[in-house]
Amino acid sequence: MKYHQIDRNLFIKNRKNFAAQMKPNSIAVFNSNDIYPISADSIMPFQQHRDIFYLSGVDQEESMLLLFPDAPSEKHREILFLKETNEHIAIWEGEKLTKERAFDVSGVKTVYWLKDLEKVFYEVMTQCETVYVNTNEHYRSSVVTETREDRFTKWWKEKYPAHTVAKSNPILQRLRAVKDAIEIDLMQTACNITEKGFRRLLSFVKPNVWEYNIEAELLHEFINHRSKGFAYTPIIASGNNANVLHYIENNQQCKAGDLILMDIAAEYANYASDLSRTIPVSGKFTTRQRAVYDAVLRVKNEATKLLVPGAIWADYHVEVGKLMTSELLGLRLLDKADVQNEDPEWPAYKKYFMHGTSHHIGLDTHDYGILTEPMKANMVFTVEPGIYLPDEGFGIRLEDDVVIQEKGVPFNLMGNIPIEAEEIEELMNK
């Protein structure tokens, strides 16, 4: 891994918090992700399942974590199962976790090789009554691939049909949504790396560069600072491309006078950051571009203040809609009749701002969090309003990542990244 080793006390604490919410005499199992094939002997780069990483810090394939807080044998209250490493694997693939190294990373004392799984699993299954299944219940989830987790669940249900089934996901949704101080530091590192990439761009962007040139500059900076790269597929959208919300081709030339909407950010240690900035190709906003830019920035700043403990996500978005409606009236994109006659299910402002303003962020870019429950301190949210004007050939989105505080305004993890129009113009024209 490129990143510095994470303090294992984070994972010890996460397991303790999860175990405290398990039913009596139950076990919970968490599997790594598969390595997915492309074709021939090519594979996709491995990405660890975020849940097993959150609970153990183990960042390699063919790994499994088993929690059994009420196990009669103390050594079976936390178990890691790993692919057995050997000299051949070390030569061809690089060193994998040894049992000693796995303890160093995770704090789990009992480590078995996967070849011992069935024997050990039989023992713990004769001692427990309930098994927690780790299904993906994220509100954006749309999974069509059978995962390693799915295969394991199918296997044990056939072999041990008399056990009761429970769900891990609601526990994880609540735990992962509230960040530990160590996690916030890791996210701050991801944001700091993103800042370095963005500042690099401000002196690089000129008329006639290509969107993919910009992508390459960012990737260079990210990897050079111990990131694996982008936290998500980057959007580098010049001109009217900005009005395609998930434009990812990044294959067009940036023309003088246009704006570039960039939704680009680094990951660090599997933690995501999520940044949007819109900059002028020629280093100077037109009067109209600047008016719209400042309107979006005002909405972002005011929306941020609404992210406080006790706030409800749906109510928050209603309030942000009111802020955006006011700005669109000021820009003469809406008039009073548009607002008076709007469909409550699709308010008038949605013509120009059709997506949500905030989502949880953490180990996933769209991280875990139950949206119907009140916000809490140390949840981390994006704030990303936008105005999209295809008839005028540009769109503007601005986005930062903020930590909800017990009192006061959220802390902006991206507070050092230029966002004011004057500063961006000044840096681009140095």
Image (cartoon, rainbow, N blue to C red):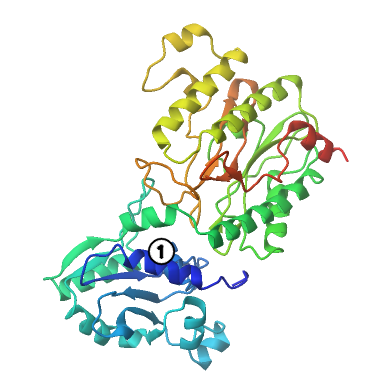
In the image: residue 108, left or right of residue 214? left
Q: Residue furthest left?
A: 162
As displayed, is residue 411 above or below residue 311? below
Residue 291, image quadrant: top right
Q: Residue furthest bottom?
A: 87
Which residue is at the front of the view, 116 or 370? 370
Instruction: Give residue 372's position: percent from left, percent from top.
Output: 34, 40
Residue on which disc 1 sits: 51
As displayed, is residue 401 above or below residue 47? above
Which residue is at the front of the view, 335 or 126? 126
Please count the marks in the image: 1
Q: Residue furthest front?
A: 407
Q: Residue at x 38, y 42 (%)?
A: 371
Q: Residue at x 40, y 49 (%)?
A: 369
Instruction: Give residue 426's position: percent from left, percent from top.
Output: 83, 36
The quarter of the image holding the N terminus is bottom right
Other-residue count near label 1 (Cα within 10 Å), few / some / many at <14 / 14–19 / ≥20? some
Instruction: Give residue 78's position: percent from left, percent from top.
Output: 35, 78
Q: Residue at x 46, y 69 (%)?
A: 11
Tell me the kind of residue under disc 1: Asp
As displayed, is residue 61 above or below residue 169? below
Instruction: Give residue 44's position: percent from left, percent from top.
Output: 50, 65
